[in-house]
Structure formats: C-alpha cells, structure tokens
Amino acid sequence: MQEVVVLGVGMHRFGKTGDAVVGNKSVTELCRSAVNAALKDAGVSWRQIQAVAAASSRFSGGKGWGLNGNDVVEDFGNTGIPVYNLSAGCAAGGNAFNVGYSLVAGGLHDMVLVVGGEVMPKGMIQTSGVADNNDPEYLRQRCVGMPGPAFWAALARRRMHEHGTTEEQLAKVTVKARKCSVGNPHARFQSEVTLGEVLASPYVSNPLRLFEICPVSNGAAAAVICSPALARRYTSQPITVATSAVATIAFDDALPRSLAGPVFGGPGLHTEAKAAVMRAFERSGIGPRDVSFTELQDNTCYYELAFPEEWGLCEPGEAERLLEAGETTPGGRMPINPSGGFVSFGEATTAMGVFQIAELTWQLRGQAGARQVPGARVGLAQTNGLGGNATAAILKR
C-alpha cells in the first residue's frame, strides 16, 4: 500500500434552513461550494478527479437517499468516473473518507474526491421518517426505546454516579467549545456563551440542557486526497493520512442500539468507537500520547469527557480536572475539538466526518487562526453512526 496525502479541503459554513448562511440551498448547492473550495485549495481541476467517495443518508435531497455522489458528478460534469455512495448514519463522512483513502492507498486511483453534505429536517434527529416494521432503522429506534437526547442523558447520569461529574462541569464543555468556535469561519455558532447561559438553557433530557446537545444543521465538506507522487506536483508540505479505520459494535457492548439486545453489564460502552480508534493506533504505530489534538463526535458534551478516557488519551475520571485546568483548549496538554465540535457546528450528518478531516488539515498546516493548536503534528478524528458504526482517522505532518 502507498501513502495517502490530503491535498485540499473545503467547506460550506454550517447554518439553519432559512438563515442568512444557508438560506434554502439544496444539498447539491452546499456541496458545490465545498467541492469548489477543496479543488481550489488543492490547486487541481474537476477533470483531474478520478473517483468520488460520497457520504449518503436518508435525510434530504439526492435520489431518495440524501446526498448522492452521482448528483455531485452531474453538477460538475459527467466525466465517466466511478462514484461510491456510502452510508453509516452519522459516521457516513468518516466511512466515505475510509473508502477514498483505501482507493488511493491500494493504487486503484491517484486522486479521489471525498464529499459529504446535508440539509437536515427540523427538530431532533430521527432514525427513520417512516414507521415501517420492515425498516431496520425504524426497528432500531423501537429497540432503543428512547430518542437520542434521552440516550445521551442516561450515559451522562451514569458518569455523574461513577465519577462525581457535576452539571456545571458538563456545561463548561459547551463554554469551552463555543469559545473555540468564535475564531472558526465555518462554524454555525461564532459567539461565546457564559456558564450561566448554558445552565439557564432548558433541560432537553435531565441532566442535559439545550446548549449541551448539538442541534441539526445544514452544511457540507469536501477533501481531495491523492498519492504522494501526485502531491509533490502541488505542495512541498503534504499532510499525510497515517491511517483510516472503521469498526462496528462488539457483541458484548452494553448499550441498546441494535436489533440484538445489549449485554447488560457488558465490559464496554460504545465499543465501536474504541475499536476504530485502537485500530487506527495499531495500524499507524501512533499512540495516544503522540496525538497533538482530537476532533471527536460530541453530539453532547458527555462524549468530550468520556471518550478521551476510553481511548487512553487521559486516565479514567481525569477528564473533568483537565477541562477545568484548561488542558482541553487549543493551548492545553490535550486539546479536544479545537474547531468547536458538533456543539458549535450542529450536525449535518454526512458532512461531519469530512469536516473533521478539513479541520485536521488546517490545524496541521498551521492555518487554524485563533483556534490553532501550537506545534500540531498529529491529529485524530472520530465519528459514531447509527447501528453501531464508527470511524477513526489519523493525519500527520
């Protein structure tokens, strides 16, 4: 296998339907903006793209299945290239990146476009828009028996019991995230919030409040990846993909998320996320202590506390102390979500894994502005998706 380089990245700023940022743009329009930005950043033309790996979902547009890579190709011009449409719920963007990475690493193509974009329906994310007993996604929702916020609240409550986490500490994650996003031109929310404002926001599912759960958003992200030989024509400072990994839940996962029931008292929560990250570490030869910063999936602020501990970035029960000491900020020892994360962007499901690749690239180039992690050399990205999917990618300079 050959190395893979991220040559160019681009995004359309995230927003809400009808606002001044995204207005009533379609998924294709949002993706057009992101892809044009990625092509310009890479210094290449559309005709040089040899394949497209596109994240796909059920939420909007396309040919009945959300973003469809064929729509992007039609928009830019049919050149006969292969298109790979990937779905994995909220992990779809990471899944598409993994496929694009594999196509280049395996030598099938020298230059691949990875793209994800979404126009989300109003309200909390639903697993399926149709109450159909033949639809596995609808059945998964019935098996879980609670919507996302209640699911996350149960996890947060367990952490409060085991580690003494307080509501103030949960709120401080959001305060930190929004402070990071002030300097991010692609974030939906670009203003700070105070601890008091977070704590004054209404409960969605106790103990989680409105400002502690990512809203749904519209947005898009794209990345041009290529072989090292091709990259040398365009840049002298390549950002290398150390590895990309995909995983699903283990049989003994203790969380109720699939058609098979959970193993109560099982040894792991979100075994898919840990498995993906551990595979990435093993394949790359990079360990937790080598990571300069992490972009992880924070549907809720709980994950920013739990995931770093589960992956060995810090010790169990240590995340709250690091948060309060400022160690999870861009200038700290363990920067988490210097972009502002999902809490500051909102979730445009299929775009999220690709947005993380864009953020890692900007950070490793030293182009992240006020949110820059000093001396960043290695970045970790991670997503989770419906049905027990997860992805992880490690980029380095």
Image (tube, grey):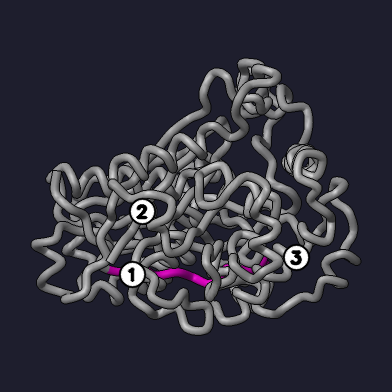
Residue under circle 3?
Answer: 172
The answer to whether residue 5 is seen in the rendering is yes
Magenta segment, which residues? 8-18
Three-letter amino acid code of the residue under disc 2: Ile
Label drawn at residue 38: 1
Q: What element does badge 3 sit on?
A: helix
Instruction: Tell me if residue 146 is in the magenta stretch.
Output: no
Task: Give the mark nearer the N terminus: 1 vs 3.
Answer: 1
**Residue 16 counted in the magenta span:** yes
Which numbered mark, 1 or 3, is in the foreground of this view?
3
Which one is nearer the viewer's eye here, 355 or 373? Answer: 373
Q: Is residue 215 visible?
A: no
Which mark, by number, is residue 245? none
What count of labels does the image hold? 3
What is the C-alpha distance between the residues marked 2 and 3? 27 Å
Residue 128: x and y, percent?
Answer: 65, 35
Tell me: 71 left or right of 243: right
In the image: residue 76, left or right of residue 32 = left
Disc 2 designates what residue? 394
Q: Earlier in the sequence, mark 2 or mark 3?
A: 3
